[in-house]
Image (cartoon, helix red, strand yellow):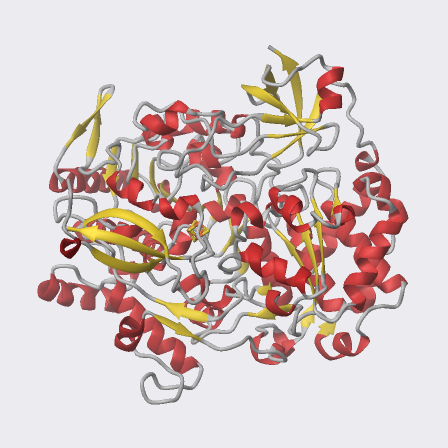
């Protein structure tokens, strides 16, 4: 159909798929997105975007999308009305609540919720209204280690220093691939350009990874020795050795430590054994190189370390996150230009979080395994065992914004557990693999183009501080997909539960419902957060300078917030006495445990047999963990193996191999490449789309690497399972 240019409207918006928040432009006609292109006028991304953002139109218009609620009847999903779906689900919830505790109703929400505050807020509110604490999040497979470390050091899980990249002169990237991920838990549009800026102004970047990643290829192209391969799952030894060497060489910032930190002496003592010489054979990095990294980091004004998934998915993942923060503290790089800064914005999310009670750590624990609740959530690694528990098992599970059967460890065990549920409700725009395996009901939700957007939770994680808001690019039909908040509010009302478990809020909600038929909406929350947040900063929105009312923000869309602030540590810390407590009892325990490993099993890091390998994970630029596979054009993934290992096992390029652990096995094609070190193999996570409801994704389905992973050995502080560097056996098919 040819459209006259008059009927096509251009709408500017920010992509909400990842932290980069690239500016995009949609061509819209008759409430339908025709195309999406990058926005050259966006003040930050300036025309940069990735294939996922461009594919948002395909997601919204995808013929495989679910538009009406579905109910499993026998072996098929049958379309039903919203009214029937909500009433039936509410009735089953009532039954479960009548016979068991509210905790037998659980919720799992995925990464998507972190980018849409209303999604996560209403999940928490819905569960609070039921009185259930059984909330699980995707953060417990990749981010909780950082939240725990920040809490222990800075007094609140949401206080997260971020690299001050525009002023950085030395950057160490450990177990991270921003060339594909565009960073995570840090917002920086076109981050590779920003990082190349470090090199352009004469700075240095080192990339540490068992795999020569896309990032390493770009950023160390002219300095190949700045790519340093490391043996998987040993980052913690490298980081502790750097701390050790900084003390040993007398390079610590004594003035900063004296003013802001406690227990420096104990820290020095606890890392005493982690000398570069001792850890060198473990990490397979020469001791001289470890010393050089530590010295360059400590001596350069404007130095930062950024570690992500490789460090978050390993055995000592909380210790990794803690060690990175501690390196910044002891070398005086915290709160300094070019080092790491406490992201500034119109409002402070950690302050707001403290007010509403999030960001705590160690006050509650999981029933299975006694893992600490982090940011109010339980570790998903325990979900299967909670469902299979003989006493008070989880009977009902809601899932939104995620796909745990592919994302959570030990998918085989989780699949068995999910089949035991009395009620499983999946809120998604596709029949994803979790829905296919276990859903009794699938409730269709709107796509990112069909909802307003303000990334509230990311406001303090921005390299270039700003606040941005846009309304939905297109509207979903009244009878079609809905937002999670609307579905959960309706359910809570039908169950006669107080809104968010708070009686005064329930009264307001009921009164508003009579007026607008929606009750308390996210917009109202947003207005409240903006007002409260600015009042906490002692500013009155619309009256004090530099403030914003919601209406002003709506009108302006993008509002810059100036440069980062430095020297604000005393204002930001939420610890007693506003000091950084370097050693807490749980960290002491972990350090002692790590010291034991230093002298035992980690010394033996050669694989016992040629067929034994360590498997590392990652993902491609076309995919976002387990989704976007039905909208972009990913290729069938393959298992990367060093050619020397291929030769030893008589494996050629493209050969199908069996990769197995005691949990399960997958059959995958091989790609021989010297971009991975010997003894290590790589396969991306988020695959395994053997799913007839995703026609495109099913074509290049790949395999689910979490069939191999373990849900028992979780980090005792973060609850994150070891998902990288796990031992596998490889056989030629
Ligand atoms: S990098 Fe890609 S997914 Fe991330 S915000 Fe930009 S367009 Fe969206």
Tell me the quadrant of the picture where the N terminus can be found. top left
Whether residue 121 is visible, yes or no, is: yes
Front residue of this view, candidates 299 and 151: 299
Q: In the picture shown, does residue 688 fall above or below 237?
A: above
Instruction: Choose top left, top right, bottom left or bottom right for residue 61.
Output: top left
Q: In the picture shown, does residue 679 fall above or below 85?
A: above
Instruction: Kindly identify the residue that appears in the image at 60 percent across and 40 percent down.
Output: 714
Instruction: Choose top left, top right, bottom left or bottom right for residue 694.
Output: top left
For residue 271, side relative to residue 92 (left or right): right
Front residue of this view, candidates 483 and 189: 189
Q: Position of residue 228 (x, y in %)?
A: 76, 45
For residue 229, side relative to residue 108 (left or right): right
Q: Residue furthest top?
A: 733
Front residue of this view, candidates 309 and 513: 309
Instruction: Kindly identify the residue that appears in the image at 20 percent across and 42 percent down.
Output: 90
Instruction: Choose top left, top right, bottom left or bottom right for residue 696.
Output: top left
Instruction: Kindly identify the residue that appears in the image at 64 percent across and 65 percent down.
Output: 153
């Amino acid at each position: 159909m040819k459209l006259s240019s008059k009927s096509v409207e251009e709408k500017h918006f920010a992509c909400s798929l990842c932290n980069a928040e690239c500016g995009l432009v949609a061509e819209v006609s008759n409430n339908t997105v025709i195309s999406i292109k990058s926005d050259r006028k966006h003040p930050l991304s300036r025309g940069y975007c990735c294939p996922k953002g461009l594919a948002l139109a395909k997601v919204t218009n995808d013929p495989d999308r679910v538009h009406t609620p579905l109910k499993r009847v026998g072996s098929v999903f049958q379309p039903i009305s919203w009214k029937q779906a909500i009433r039936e689900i509410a009735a089953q919830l009532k039954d479960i609540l009548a016979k068991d505790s509210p905790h037998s109703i659980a919720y799992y929400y995925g990464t998507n919720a972190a980018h849409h505050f209303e999604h996560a807020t209403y999940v928490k509110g819905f569960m609070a209204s039921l009185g259930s604490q059984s909330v699980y999040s995707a953060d417990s497979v990749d981010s909780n280690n950082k939240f725990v470390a920040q809490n222990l050091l800075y007094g609140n899980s949401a206080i997260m220093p971020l690299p001050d990249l525009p002023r950085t002169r030395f950057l160490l990237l450990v177990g991270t691939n921003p060339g594909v991920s565009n960073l995570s838990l840090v917002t920086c549009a076109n981050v590779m350009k920003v990082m190349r800026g470090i090199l352009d102004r004469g700075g240095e970047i080192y990339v540490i990874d068992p795999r020569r990643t896309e990032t390493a290829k770009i950023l160390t192209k002219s300095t190949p020795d700045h790519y340093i391969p490391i043996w998987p799952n040993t980052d913690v030894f490298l980081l502790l050795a750097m701390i050790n060497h900084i003390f040993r060489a007398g390079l610590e910032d004594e003035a900063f430590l004296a003013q802001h930190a406690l227990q420096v002496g104990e820290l020095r003592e606890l890392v005493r054994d982690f000398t570069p010489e001792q850890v060198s054979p473990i990490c397979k990095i020469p001791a001289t190189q470890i010393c050089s990294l530590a010295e360059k980091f400590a001596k350069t004004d404007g130095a930062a370390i950024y570690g992500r998934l490789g460090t978050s998915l390993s055995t000592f993942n909380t210790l990794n996150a803690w060690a990175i923060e501690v390196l910044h503290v002891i070398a005086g790089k915290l709160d300094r230009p070019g080092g790491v800064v406490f992201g500034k914005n119109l409002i402070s999310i950690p302050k707001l979080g403290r007010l509403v009670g999030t960001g705590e750590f160690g006050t509650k624990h999981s029933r299975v395994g006694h893992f600490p609740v982090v940011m109010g959530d339980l570790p998903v690694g325990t979900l299967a065992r909670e469902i299979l528990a003989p006493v008070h098992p989880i009977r009902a599970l809601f899932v939104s914004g995620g796909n745990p059967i592919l994302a959570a460890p030990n998918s085989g065990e989780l699949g068995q557990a999910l089949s035991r549920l009395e009620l499983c409700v999946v809120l998604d725009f596709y029949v994803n693999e979790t829905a296919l395996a276990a859903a009794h009901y699938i409730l269709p939700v709107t796509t990112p183009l069909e909802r307003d957007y303000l990334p509230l939770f990311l406001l303090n994680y921005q390299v270039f501080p700003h606040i941005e808001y846009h309304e939905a690019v297109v509207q979903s039909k009244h009878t079609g997909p809905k937002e999670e908040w609307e579905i959960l509010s309706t359910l809570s009302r039908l169950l006669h539960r107080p809104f968010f478990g708070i009686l005064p809020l329930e009264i307001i909600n009921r009164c508003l419902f009579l007026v607008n038929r929606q009750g308390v909406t996210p917009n109202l929350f947003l207005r409240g957060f903006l007002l409260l947040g600015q009042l906490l900063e002692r500013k009155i929105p619309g009256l004090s300078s530099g403030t914003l009312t919601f209406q002003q923000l709506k009108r302006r869309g993008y509002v810059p917030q100036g440069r980062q602030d430095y020297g604000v540590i005393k204002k930001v810390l939420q610890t007693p006495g506003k000091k950084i407590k370097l050693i807490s009892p749980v960290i002491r325990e972990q350090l002692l445990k790590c010291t034991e490993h230093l002298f035992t099993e980690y010394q033996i890091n050669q694989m016992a047999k040629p067929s034994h390998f360590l498997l590392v994970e990652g993902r491609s630029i076309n995919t976002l963990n387990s989704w976007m596979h039905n909208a972009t054009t990913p290729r069938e993934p393959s298992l990367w193996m060093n050619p020397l290992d291929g030769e030893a096992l008589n494996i050629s390029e493209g050969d199908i191999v069996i990769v197995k652990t005691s949990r399960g096995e997958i059959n995958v094609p091989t790609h021989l490449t010297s971009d991975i070190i010997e003894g290590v193999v790589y396969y991306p996570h988020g695959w395994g789309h053997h799913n007839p409801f995703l026609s495109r994704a099913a074509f290049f389905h790949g395999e689910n690497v979490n069939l191999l992973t373990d849900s028992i050995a979780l980090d005792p502080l973060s609850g994150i399972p070891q998902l990288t560097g796990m031992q596998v056996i490889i056989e030629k098919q």
